[in-house]
Amino acid sequence: MHSSELTRATFDDVMVPNYAPGNMIPVKAKGSRVQDQAGREYIDLAGGIAVTGLGHGHPALLKALQEQSEQVWHLSNLLTNEPALRLGQYLCEHTFAERVFMANSGAEANEAAFKLARRYAWQHHGENKQEIIAFDNSFHGRTLFTLAVGGQPKYREGFEPVPRGIVHGTFNDLASVDALLSERTCAIVVEPIQGEGGVRPAEKAFLQGLRERCDQVGALLVFDEVQCGVGRTGSLYAYQHYGVTPDILTTAKALGNGFPVAAMLTTAAIGNSLGVGTHGSTYGGNPLACAVAETVLKTVNQPEVLAGVTERHQMIRESLEQMGRELGLFKEVRGGGLLMGAELAPAYAGKAKALMDAALDAGVMILIAGPDVLRFAPSLIIPEQDLAEALERMQVAFTQWVQTQQG
C-alpha cells in the first residue's frame, strides 16, 4: 500500500510553490495506463509533456537501465564511457550530426546551442556578430539565457536583466525576419513545432526561408526539437520531416523517456568551437542516461513505430474535429504527428484548464498549451484501443462540460 500520510497537502508544506499540481497523485504506471493512490486508473494522453514516447515501464528500457546499473553509474567527464560513445555514434549515424554534446535537460541543450552559436561567430567573424533572432510565443527553457531567447515575456518577469542581443520575429512570417536580419545576426533559433506556444507547426517555406537567410549572412540555424523530436512527428527528428537541415539541433524530453538526458547535435566544423574547457556538464554523458537514450532511439527509429505515429495522429485529429463540429468547441485542430493542439472556439476562450480538469475527472490525462489550447502528446505506441477509449471518455466529458456552460 502507498503511504496515506503523503497527500496533495504535503506538496504545499514542503515544496516551493512554483507548480500547481492536480489533486491526484500517480503511484504506478504501465504502458499508457496510470494509477493513483486510490487505485483509480487513467489513460495517459499527456506523455509527461511529450516525454514518455514509449509509454511507462517499457521492457527494453527497464532492461537497459538495469544492465547498466550493474556496470557503472557515474565517472565524470575526465573519462568517457561506452554508453555515451554508443549514443553519440547512433545520433551521428542517423542524423545530419557529426558531433554531439550531452546534457541533462532541454534547457541545458539549448543553453549549449546558444553558447556555441555565439562562440562560433566570435571565432569566425569577430565580436560584433552576436545577435540571435528568435520568435514570439517560442519556449526554449527556464535558464536566464534560454528565457531571454524564448518569446514569452511572462516567463522573464521579475528575473531581469536577462542576456542581451536577442530579438524576436513573428513565427511563420519571413518578412518579420528580414526586418531583423543583419550582418550582426549569429543565429536564428526556431521550434519546428512551437509546443508551449500553442502547438503551432512551422510552414515548410518558412523553415526553408530561414535556412536561406542564415546562409546569406553567415548565421547558424538552430532547431529546438526538445518537444517535437524523437519520433513525435513520424520522423526521427522533425527536420527530416520538413527536409530542412539545421546547423545545430537540440533534443531532450522523449530522448530518455523520462530519464533525464539531452543532447545538442552539430557538425564537426561548428562543434570545434567548443574546445577543451569552454563548456561542460557534470552529469552530461552519464552512463545510465546514455544507455536508456540509445535504447529509446533504436526502439523509436523503426518503420512500424514511425508509421504508427501517423495512424494515431489521424485518430486524434478525426475525433477532435468531430467534437469541434458537434459541440462548437474548437476553432482549429493542428499539430504534427503525436503533438496535437485543439484551439478553443472564441465562446470558450481561456477555458483550456477547465477542460483539462474535466478530462482528468473522466480518467484521461491531457495537457494545455496556454489558456486557449488543449495539447495532446501521448506515447507513440499507445495501443489503439486505449486511444479510442480515451477519446470516447473525452467526448462524454466535453459534451457534459459544454452543457453546463450553456445551462
Image (cartoon, rainbow, N blue to C red):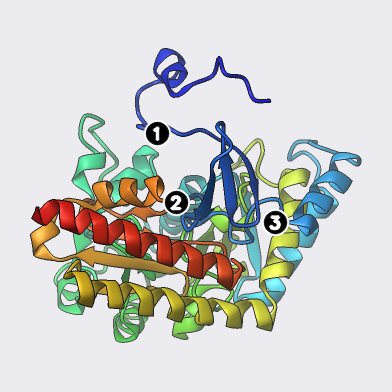
Q: Secondary structure at mark 2?
A: strand
Towards the viewer: 50 or 29: 29
Q: Residues within 10 Å of mark 1 (few under 14, many from 20)?
A: few
Residue at 59% from the left image edge and 61% from the top image edge: 53
Q: Residues within 10 Å of mark 2 (few under 14, many from 20)?
A: many
The answer to which of marks 1 and 3 sits earlier in the sequence is 1
Q: Which image quarter holds the N terminus?
A: top right
Query: Disc 1 residue type?
Result: Pro
Query: Disc 3 residue type?
Result: Ala
Residue at 65% from the left image edge and 64% from the top image edge: 99
Q: Secondary structure at mark 3?
A: helix
Q: Secondary structure at mark 1?
A: loop
Query: Disc 2 residue type?
Result: Met
The answer to which of marks 1 and 2 sits earlier in the sequence is 1
Task: Locate residue 367 relative to residue 160 in the image: left or right.
Answer: right
Q: Which residue is mark 3?
A: 293
| Alpha carbons under labels 1 and 3: distance apart | 27 Å
Residue 355 visible in image: yes
Q: Which residue is mark 1?
A: 21
Residue at 75% from the left image edge and 36% from the top image edge: 76
Give percent across and percent down for residue 215: 37, 79
Quadrant in the picture for residue 307: bottom right
| Callout 1 touching callout 3 (CB < 8 Å) | no
Q: Which residue is mark 2?
A: 365
Q: Residues within 10 Å of mark 3 (few under 14, many from 20)?
A: many
